[in-house]
Amino acid sequence: MKVKNVTGTNYAINKTVQIDVNTPNINDGYILPDQTLDLTKSLTLAELDSAQQLRDGLKSGSLVFVINGLQVDQSESIQIYESGHSEWAKIFVPEINQSNLYEGLASGFLYVKNCLIG
């Protein structure tokens, strides 16, 4: 999940959030002004789902989602976030879409003729 700080100041998100997970940095825990940061490199899906700072940042307009390299506006970011973790996770965990497809095929909800997946 990539988010961008659209404010002119550091935005405190979570002490475990790191700019580079391999190198400690004095700015770890912050999203710097105009910086886009992939939170999935530092936080698990459960941690993202319960991150109050992320929720507050999106609702205040300090943070917005960046999807496929494109920054979305505040209302779209809120709409994506409020759709729930099983939905917004699709923007950064491609395996979820594949898993949902396989589950639909296995359960008989989907029938696909001559389909190649992979």
Image: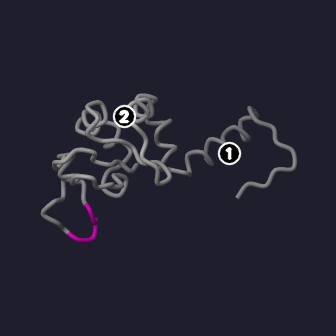
Q: Which residues are magenta?
A: 19-23
Q: Is residue 23 left or right of residue 77?
A: left
Q: Residue 1, position in %: x, y? A: 40, 49
For mark 1, what is the residue?
A: 102
Q: Dot 1 lies on which element?
A: helix
In reply to whether residue 20 is colored magenta, the answer given is yes
Q: Residue 94, position in %: x, y? A: 55, 51
Q: Dot 2 lies on which element?
A: helix
Kind of residue indicated by mark 2: Gln
Q: Front-most of 3 and 88? A: 3
Residue 52, compared with residue 23, is above or below; it is: above
In reply to whether residue 94 is colored magenta, the answer given is no
Q: Residue at x 42, y 46 (%)?
A: 71
For mark 2, what is the residue?
A: 74
Kind of residue indicated by mark 1: Tyr
Q: Front-most of 59 and 22? A: 59
Q: Residues within 10 Å of mark 1 (few under 14, many from 20)?
A: some
Q: Residue 104, position in %: x, y? A: 69, 37
